[in-house]
Image (spheres, rainbow, N blue to C red):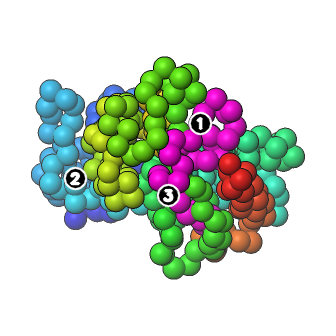
Amino acid sequence: MDREPGWELWRTFDGVMREGSLSAAARTLGITQPTAGRHIAELEACLSTDALFTRSARGLMPTEAALALASQAEAMAAAAAALVRTASAPANAVSGVVRISASEVIGAEVLPRILAPLTAAHPGLQFELLLTNASSDLLRRDADVAIRMTEPRQQALLVRSIGRIRLRFYAHRDYLARTARIDTVADLARHAIIGFDRDAASRRSIEAVWPDLPAFALRTDNQLAQIAMVRAGCGIGVVQDPIACRDPALVPVLPDAFHAHLPVWIAMHEDLRPTRRMRVVFDALVAGMTAHVRSGEHR
């Protein structure tokens, strides 16, 4: 290495890795495309390496050298963003930025009901929502607080177990009114089952609980789309009891034969405990998710 690259070079590199082109990275980072190009060229010079990207019909493709650097650059970007969030307000204030990671379903169906009263009580709070079904790395500060459906195994985390959300098959009453009666598992063969497309892990998890299910007639890996299709009367699909109980038109299908549970944890890095806004948000998520879990217990 001829000299140590500055953060702005790594920042641009990470942007190009994420966006796939100089122009898109420049727009995201608030710089010009020529500046982005100079940053990449300067990074290559600093590292005394061959080209980090090659041009293709789909944009810039990372070389093996770039792929080897990508995870560390991403960690640097996450740490830099965490620094900005930390500096967004004094540690003893209930204001500033908090980044929350949650699944797409929780982010769309549950978090708004939790965050609305929280922002009303503390108008200085600002939120960044990272909605992903993958587990965010809290130690790397991809997020400040996470709602997890798998038990956090990393050390140095403050973790609260919330309980379990029951999952069952549901259908809209209009769908059930126009289709064949369902009395047994075998009857499902005559119905449209909504499920996963290319997400093999999720498909296997459903098949492990319900091995006798017929093939999915409507397939999408987007769980929000699955719920939307159930609500629209397209077929039968998996819905959380607490979400389904909000809509009296959704009816459980063979509830004694098909049910599973989704465990819930709230987690954050224990170093954030002294920061008041983090504690307030953590406690609000614990209370809100606890209420969400309990709301479906008597369906």
**The image quarter in which residue 60 lies:** top left
Marks 2 and 3 in Cβ contact (< 8 Å): no
Q: Position of residue 234 (x, y in %)?
A: 45, 25
* Mark 1 or 2: the one toward you: 1
Label 2 residue SS: helix
Q: How many marks?
A: 3
Name the residue located 53 percent from the left edge and 60 percent from the top edge: 261
| Gap between marks 1 and 3 measured at Cα | 16 Å
Q: Which three-letter amino acid code belongs to the residue tagged 2?
A: Ala
Q: Position of residue 137 (x, y in %)?
A: 47, 63
* Mark 1 or 3: the one toward you: 1
**The image quarter in which residue 245 lies:** top right
Q: Bounds of the magenta span?
A: 239-268
Query: Residue 66: which numbered mark, if any?
Result: 2
Label 3 residue SS: strand
Which mark sits nearer the N-terminus, 1 or 2? 2
Q: Which three-letter amino acid code belongs to the residue tagged 1?
A: Val
Q: Which three-letter amino acid code belongs to the residue tagged 3?
A: Ala
Image quadrant holding the N terminus, namely: bottom left
Which mark sits nearer the N-terminus, 1 or 3? 1
Whether residue 49 is visible to the viewer of this picture, yes or no, is yes
Q: Is residue 152 rendered magenta in the image?
A: no
- Viewer-proximal residue, 193 or 148? 193
Which residue is denoted by mark 3 in the rendering?
260
Which residue is denoted by mark 1 in the rendering?
251
Which residue occupies the extreme bottom position in the image? 155
| Gap between marks 2 and 3 measured at Cα | 42 Å
132 vs 144, left or right, is left
Q: Is residue 247 rendered magenta in the image?
A: yes
